[in-house]
């Protein structure tokens, strides 16, 4: 799949934003956070989520109809994501406003924010995980990975210990995802044979192009990344997303300014991870072009 | 509405015969032609006279070579690819705006361009690459089964078929109701064993394909296997003489 | 889009005309709104396509609106080949042309050399050239398919494609020889669909397994150029197995004719005839000599005869003696064709079994040419079709004759299930004109240029013994060159051989690129100047085309033509007819839209020039125009009384067909009838047409000929024997000595095969290189077409698996291909389904930078390539130092597919194919994207 920057930024930034919101919400529910921190971190969450959503907006080819995307919640994960994120962000704004106006917070709202933001991340991940056409995405590891990415990222600024644990879980999930993704097309039934109506094991190859130049399908869904290149990026991603952040947390515990650096490194790592998430994903349409 | 209807009345679709298709691209261009003609319709082309020309097509024809495992010979065949109007169309259910839908009355999968926001998710959800996002109009394009032909009241009745079916020079494409066991397409599917593409995707395509028939691998000659008569010129001429007398 | 808007309203009104996206000439419905073409689809009623349409036809809108369309007459201002022009008015353009042409006509009309390319009005352009008086006229047939046409007309009085077709409804076995998407594309596709539907068997003999060959039930991947040998081996096998149709051979062919085999008075090889020239045969029962055509005669196929003139054997005896020779045995033939013996045996088996065990009988009484009543039509349901893969070899004429021989032996020509003529054919060679070439100042030529010779007496030499034609057509080098030799014209004009010329006038032929052999050298010849005078060696070039092709850049005066939707045309029975076996048809084009540029139809321009030059037939005694324009000509012109370009809707009431008076609303009738006319052949006349009284009578009524022309098939082609027997000719008619061997070997009156290559050459260049035309492109035209260039924007050289492995190729690699003539560097791709000794590519995808209104960096110009550079127009010097043209020695057909190469892997980091040439300047702008 084409690793479009707008989509990558969307999943990375909105994931981080909603992750932050969920951690704030949980701590608010547990009364483990100050009102000032709620305002600061919620605002940050709001900021990143919104940037992410705006970024996704740029992916749309016909932006004027974006508002209609909230209409199909019954079947569409993308629609659910749109509704859920807008709903969640409205509550974030309401929560902040309530604190400003009332100088207090309602801890029960925290649990709503916690759940709603994770649901939002879940709906985002399901946009990809639902696609049978992309076997490396089409399993529950995808939402698990997205949720823990959100939680780990969101926790870095707020809590050292939890973030270490979450980062560790996320790292394991990430390795597991890559391991499974590498094997996903072997495990399933689709081959060039089934794509063309034959049986699974057929020796078939395209000998002449259906069209000699690239088209939308090839640009969007048939992206080839060299294996060597991909492995290199996996190392960079793993280092930036986990190794460096966890090391810095251990070396500089509780240091807020270092945390900013950690966040930056982590997000860069996630960016590469998501780039690979798309670039390495093989869509079934590619069988027609091989 | 992106909820899939139960199409109990009609299932309209195409039957494509890979044993007959010669890969001429006639259907590809006729489709492009019909679906970009007139004032309303557009399938854009960009860089039309430059490097990297790219345009939106609703139908493509691929060329393949297949090693026939029973004869060990390499055979070539052509494969037209377009929307299969699946019963369980994943492209419809993923659509967030309701632009994609499947018609209850005949099962045709369509895009209402007035609602489409061009997110491309339906194209991702389609296993077959049947949908192409038009770069100029920003909306998703796909085979409409020429709905503006098949229900036209102005076209002569024999022309009320998808344009790819009308134009196909070899007659490798047929259009009909797969829900009706007595339709020509249903009968052919039964007779020749019509297949689904990627059945494992569980999309239940309406369109069916007929695979290339078994080709003979230069069979050993029956006249070659008999002991060869050593016919010499004189012998043959004698036979001709006798035969002419009998004529 | 779910709007059930009625398309017919938004698509405007329908005008029915004829497609011109290839030579197939399908009927099209053109939808027009506000004088703009908005949609094109197939015409359901049209006899050629019955509503279907190919990729080219369906994208006609981009041919019609091509950015490369020329807009005004042009005069060259730069050097030839630069592409620099100034626009001029039509008045000025016509004046320049007349200033050039008028003195030529007055002094030496042969110095005008007029060749038309993809011309679909050859009976008109030929007539114009005849009236001008130059002997130098032909269309592109000489580099296209003259081998098929000439072999067909000489042997069976018809040919594949335009003059006949398989009986798609009844055939049980069809053999395709060398057929890709060339000629008759939609009818063949429709026919193959019918065969598939009925479960009839298709066998494809072709080095490459694409297109029609892919869907064939059996594919025989023959080595290019060896088809003739395969066919003669089939003949050998069928004869040995006695699987031949004796009744057919006895009744309808010249196999009982008597050939003088031991001549005393130098008539060796000639047939025994009576005083009136009627061939004689020996009656099988009485043993007496009889006229072949006498009622009650049962000719013997075997008995010999002798008299004071020599001794005579039947053609059939010669045939048996020749083809039973062991050299034609499948065992010896198979390895030469790259096949296995079993493949040939099984083919023979299939043919014999189908012809004789599945024969058809149609209960329909008819009377044969002897006046004998027959009770029905016996059918041998084996049909053949052959095209470019046979024709584009220098043994193509004889190979095509071999295929016809095979058809005749099993009795499958014009019988149910076999090959059937399309009217106005059959027409034997001796009912066609002979070549005419006698020119004199200020007068018209003595007759039509092109025709069929009957012997050396018809060859085209001037009184001084020099070839009369610039292309050396109808000379000993290519005596049966019935379509001329367009591919030799530039070379001969350049070298002044056989004489110097003044003006080269070309129409719609891309001679400076993909329509020439040895393109680089051709460009040099077009631009070379005489050292003494400084003038171009080809002094003047006038060219008419609709588009900015590479050839425009090499011309001095450009007369811009219209597109096919802006013109009148007639698809005439006098020309290259359309039609189907059971009906005769012709058709028109008419301007369904007006041109939006200052262009004129080429035919109109020729008539205007004709009037200005005061050519006979174009002006009356008062020098006033006889025809207002081409449309007027189409209605008013008469070749013979009552016979005009259009056969339908003749006479005052528009009810006559075939013959009839001129009608001035004939074109209106055609338009109302959907752009065509057609008339069914009577049931009794549907088969056995050459010998069927009912057909012959109908054909005379229709005006195909003026008297009945029954004939027998020429298994033995006497004109070739006459050529071979040149020793008895007077000295001024004799061939040059260096041609003796070639005449002896190649002009065999019975079909013969030879290898096109000597073994030394094969050792050096062991690989055959051929091209195919893709189904979605028509020669160079496709690349200007926005939709088609997305399908075929560049081409690769397809390499067989064994070469691929041997040279260790990988995807993305490039190769250098070298021939005797030149070398090119091209991208390669693997294709397994091809003869292991062969490489091939799509034809005419590669473009010269700057042409066709394409940006100079397009794929067509960078990666795309043509293999024409590798093909020499002249063969290497023979022992006497002479260079023959690279053509069939009998017909002069360009031998495109005789190409041999070697191949090596090369690094090509630039990813640009070689050779490359300077970017052409362009009088038209690079095209822009279409907007709604």
Image (tube, helix red, strand yellow):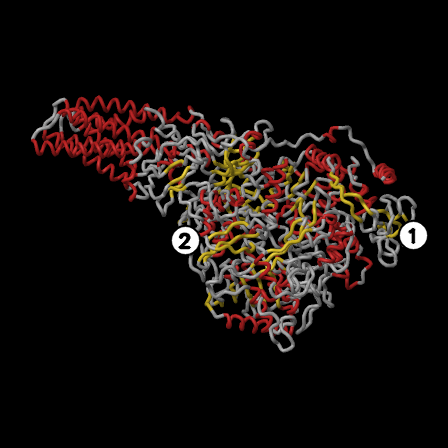
Q: What's the chain of the residue with tag 2?
A: C
Q: What's the chain of the residue with tag 1?
A: C
From the image, tell me which residue sits under label 1: C307
**Which comes before the other along the chain, label 1 or label 2?**
1
Name the spot of residue C488 as percent of width and height, x first.
62, 58
In this rendering, is residue C492 above or below C315? below
Observer-nearest residue: B30 or C231?
A: B30
- The residue tagged with tag 1: helix, strand or loop? strand
In this rendering, is residue C483 above or below A257? below
Observer-nearest residue: B218 or C339?
A: B218
Name the spot of residue C93 as percent of width and height, x first.
52, 70
Observer-nearest residue: C141 or C616?
A: C616
Task: Name the image quarter holding residue C33.
Answer: bottom left
Residue at point 81%, 33% (across, down): B230
Name the spot of residue C63 as percent of width and height, x first.
49, 55
Is A93 on the left-hand or right-hand side of C731?
A: left
From the image, tell me which residue sits under label 2: C930
């Amino acid at each position: 799949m084409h690793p479009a920057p707008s989509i990558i930024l969307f999943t990375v930034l909105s994931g981080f934003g909603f992750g932050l919101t969920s951690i704030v919400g949980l701590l608010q529910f547990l009364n483990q956070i100050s009102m000032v921190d709620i305002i600061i971190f919620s605002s940050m969450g709001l900021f990143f989520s919104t940037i992410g959503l705006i970024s996704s907006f740029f992916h749309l080819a016909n932006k004027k109809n974006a508002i209609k995307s909230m209409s199909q919640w019954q079947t569409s994960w993308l629609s659910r994501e749109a509704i859920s994120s807008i709903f969640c962000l409205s509550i974030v704004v309401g929560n902040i406003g309530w604190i400003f106006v009332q100088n207090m917070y309602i801890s029960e709202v925290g649990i709503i924010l916690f759940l709603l933001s994770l649901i939002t991340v879940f709906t985002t991940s399901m946009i990809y995980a639902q696609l049978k056409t992309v076997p490396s995405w089409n399993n529950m590891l995808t939402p698990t990975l997205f949720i823990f990415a959100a939680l780990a990222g969101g926790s870095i600024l707020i809590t050292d210990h939890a973030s270490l644990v979450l980062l560790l879980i996320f790292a394991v999930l990430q390795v597991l995802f890559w391991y499974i993704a590498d094997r996903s097309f072997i495990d399933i039934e689709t081959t060039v044979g089934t794509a063309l109506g034959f049986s699974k094991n057929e020796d078939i190859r395209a000998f002449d192009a259906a069209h000699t130049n690239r088209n939308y399908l090839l640009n969007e869904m048939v992206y080839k990344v060299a294996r060597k290149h991909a492995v290199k990026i996996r190392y960079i991603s793993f280092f930036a997303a986990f190794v460096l952040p966890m090391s810095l947390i251990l070396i500089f515990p509780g240091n807020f300014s270092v945390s900013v650096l950690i966040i930056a490194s982590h997000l860069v790592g996630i960016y590469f991870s998501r780039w690979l998430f798309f670039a390495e994903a093989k869509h079934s349409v590619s069988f027609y072009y091989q | 509405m992106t909820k899939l209807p139960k199409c109990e009345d009609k299932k309209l679709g195409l039957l494509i015969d890979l044993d007959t298709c010669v890969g001429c691209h006639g259907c590809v261009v006729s489709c492009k032609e019909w679906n970009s003609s007139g004032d309303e319709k557009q399938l854009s082309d960009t860089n039309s006279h430059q490097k990297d020309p790219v345009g939106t097509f609703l139908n493509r024809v691929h060329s393949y070579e297949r090693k026939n495992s029973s004869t060990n010979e390499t055979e070539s065949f052509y494969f037209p690819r377009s929307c299969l109007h699946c019963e369980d169309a994943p492209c419809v259910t993923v659509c967030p705006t309701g632009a994609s839908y499947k018609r209850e009355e005949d099962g045709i999968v369509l895009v209402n361009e007035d609602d489409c926001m061009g997110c491309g998710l339906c194209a991702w959800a389609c296993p077959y690459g049947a949908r192409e996002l038009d770069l100029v109009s920003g909306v998703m394009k796909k085979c409409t089964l020429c709905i503006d032909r098949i229900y036209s009241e102005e076209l002569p009745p024999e022309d009320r078929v998808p344009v790819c079916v009308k134009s196909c020079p070899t007659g490798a494409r047929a259009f009909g109701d797969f829900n009706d066991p007595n339709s020509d397409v249903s009968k052919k599917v039964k007779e020749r064993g019509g297949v689904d593409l990627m059945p494992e995707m569980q999309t239940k395509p309406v369109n069916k394909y007929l695979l290339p028939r078994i080709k003979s691998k230069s069979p050993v000659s029956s006249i070659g296997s008999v002991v060869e008569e050593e016919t010499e010129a004189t012998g043959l001429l004698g036979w001709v003489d006798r035969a002419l007398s009998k004529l | 889009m779910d709007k059930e808007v009625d398309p017919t309203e938004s698509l405007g009104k329908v005008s029915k005309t004829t497609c011109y996206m290839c030579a197939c000439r399908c009927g099209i419905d053109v939808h027009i709104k506000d004088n703009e073409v908005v949609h094109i689809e197939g015409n359901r009623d049209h006899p050629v396509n019955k509503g279907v349409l190919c990729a080219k036809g369906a994208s006609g809108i981009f041919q019609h609106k091509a950015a490369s369309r020329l807009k005004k007459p042009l005069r060259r201002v730069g050097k030839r080949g630069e592409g620099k022009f100034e626009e001029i008015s039509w008045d000025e353009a016509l004046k320049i042309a007349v200033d050039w042409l008028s003195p030529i006509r007055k002094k030496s009309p042969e110095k005008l050399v007029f060749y038309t390319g993809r011309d679909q009005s050859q009976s008109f352009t030929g007539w114009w050239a005849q009236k001008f008086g130059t002997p130098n006229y032909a269309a592109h047939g000489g580099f296209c398919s003259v081998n098929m046409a000439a072999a067909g007309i000489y042997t069976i009085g018809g040919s594949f494609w335009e003059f006949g077709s398989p009986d798609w409804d009844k055939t049980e076995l069809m053999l395709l020889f060398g057929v890709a998407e060339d000629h008759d594309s939609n009818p063949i596709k429709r026919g193959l669909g019918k065969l598939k539907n009925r479960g009839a068997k298709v066998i494809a003999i072709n080095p490459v397994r694409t297109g029609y060959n892919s869907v064939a039930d059996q594919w025989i991947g023959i080595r290019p150029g060896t088809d003739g040998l395969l066919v003669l081996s089939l003949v050998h096998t069928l004869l040995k197995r006695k699987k031949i149709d004796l009744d057919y051979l006895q009744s309808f062919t010249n196999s009982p004719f008597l050939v003088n085999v031991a001549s005393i008075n130098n008539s060796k090889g000639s047939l025994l005839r009576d005083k009136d020239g009627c061939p004689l045969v020996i009656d099988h029962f009485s043993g007496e000599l009889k006229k072949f055509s006498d009622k009650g005669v049962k000719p013997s196929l075997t008995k010999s005869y002798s008299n004071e003139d020599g001794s005579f054997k039947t053609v059939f005896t010669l045939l048996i003696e020749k083809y039973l020779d062991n050299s034609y045995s499948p065992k010896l033939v198979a390895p030469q064709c790259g096949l296995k013996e079993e493949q040939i045996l099984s083919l023979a088996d299939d043919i014999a079994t189908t012809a004789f065990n599945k024969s058809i009988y149609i209960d329909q009484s008819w009377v044969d040419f002897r006046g004998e009543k027959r009770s029905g039509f016996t059918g041998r349901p084996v049909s053949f079709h052959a095209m470019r893969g046979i024709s584009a070899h220098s043994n193509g004429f004889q190979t095509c004759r071999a295929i016809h021989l095979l058809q005749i032996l099993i009795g499958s020509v014009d019988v149910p299930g076999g090959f059937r003529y399309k009217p106005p054919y059959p027409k034997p060679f001796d009912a066609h004109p002979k070549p005419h070439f006698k020119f004199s100042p200020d007068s018209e030529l003595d007759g039509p240029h092109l025709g069929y010779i009957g012997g050396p007496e018809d060859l085209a030499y001037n009184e001084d013994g020099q070839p009369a034609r610039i292309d050396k057509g109808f000379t000993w080098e290519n005596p049966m060159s019935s379509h001329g030799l367009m591919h030799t014209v530039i070379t001969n004009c350049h070298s002044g051989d056989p004489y110097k010329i003044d003006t080269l006038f070309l129409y719609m032929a891309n001679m400076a690129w993909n329509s020439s052999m040895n393109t680089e050298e051709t460009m040099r010849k077009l631009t070379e100047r005489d050292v003494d005078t400084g003038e171009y060696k080809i002094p003047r070039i006038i060219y008419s085309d609709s588009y900015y092709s590479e050839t425009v850049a090499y011309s001095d005066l450009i007369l811009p033509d219209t597109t096919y939707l802006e013109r009148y045309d007639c698809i005439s029975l006098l020309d290259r007819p359309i039609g189907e076996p059971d009906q005769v048809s012709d058709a028109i084009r008419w301007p369904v839209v007006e041109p939006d540029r200052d262009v004129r139809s080429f035919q109109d321009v020729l008539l205007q020039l004709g009037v200005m030059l005061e050519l006979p037939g174009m002006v009356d005694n008062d020098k006033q125009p006889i025809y207002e324009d081409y449309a007027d000509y189409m209605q008013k012109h008469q070749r013979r009384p009552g016979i005009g370009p259009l056969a339908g809707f003749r006479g005052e009431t528009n009810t006559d067909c075939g013959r009839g008076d001129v009608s001035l609303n004939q074109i209106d009738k055609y338009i109302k009838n959907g752009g065509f006319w057609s008339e069914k052949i009577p049931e009794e006349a549907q088969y056995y047409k050459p010998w069927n009284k009912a057909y012959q009578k109908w054909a005379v009524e229709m005006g195909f000929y003026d008297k009945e022309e029954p004939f027998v098939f020429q298994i033995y082609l006497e004109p070739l024997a006459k050529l071979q027997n040149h020793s008895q000719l007077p000295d001024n008619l004799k061939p040059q000595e260096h041609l003796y061997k070639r005449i002896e070997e190649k002009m065999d009156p019975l079909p013969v095969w030879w290898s096109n290559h000597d073994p030394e050459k094969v050792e050096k260049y062991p690989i055959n290189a051929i091209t195919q035309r893709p189904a979605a492109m028509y020669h160079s035209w496709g690349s200007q077409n926005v939709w088609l260039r997305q399908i075929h924007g560049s081409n690769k050289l397809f390499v067989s698996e064994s070469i691929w492995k041997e040279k260790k190729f990988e995807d993305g690699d490039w190769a250098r291909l070298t021939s005797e003539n030149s070398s090119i560097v091209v991208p390669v791709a693997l294709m397994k389904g091809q003869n292991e000794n062969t490489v091939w590519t799509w034809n005419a995808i590669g473009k010269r930078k700057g042409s066709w209104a394409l940006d100079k960096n397009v794929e067509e110009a960078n990666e795309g390539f043509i293999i024409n550079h590798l093909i020499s127009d002249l063969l290497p010097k023979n022992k006497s130092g002479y260079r023959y043209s690279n053509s069939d020695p009998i017909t002069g057909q360009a031998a495109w597919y005789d190409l041999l190469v070697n191949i090596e892997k090369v690094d090509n980091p630039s990813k640009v194919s070689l050779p490359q040439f300077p970017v052409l300047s362009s009088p038209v702008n690079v095209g822009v994207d279409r907007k709604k």
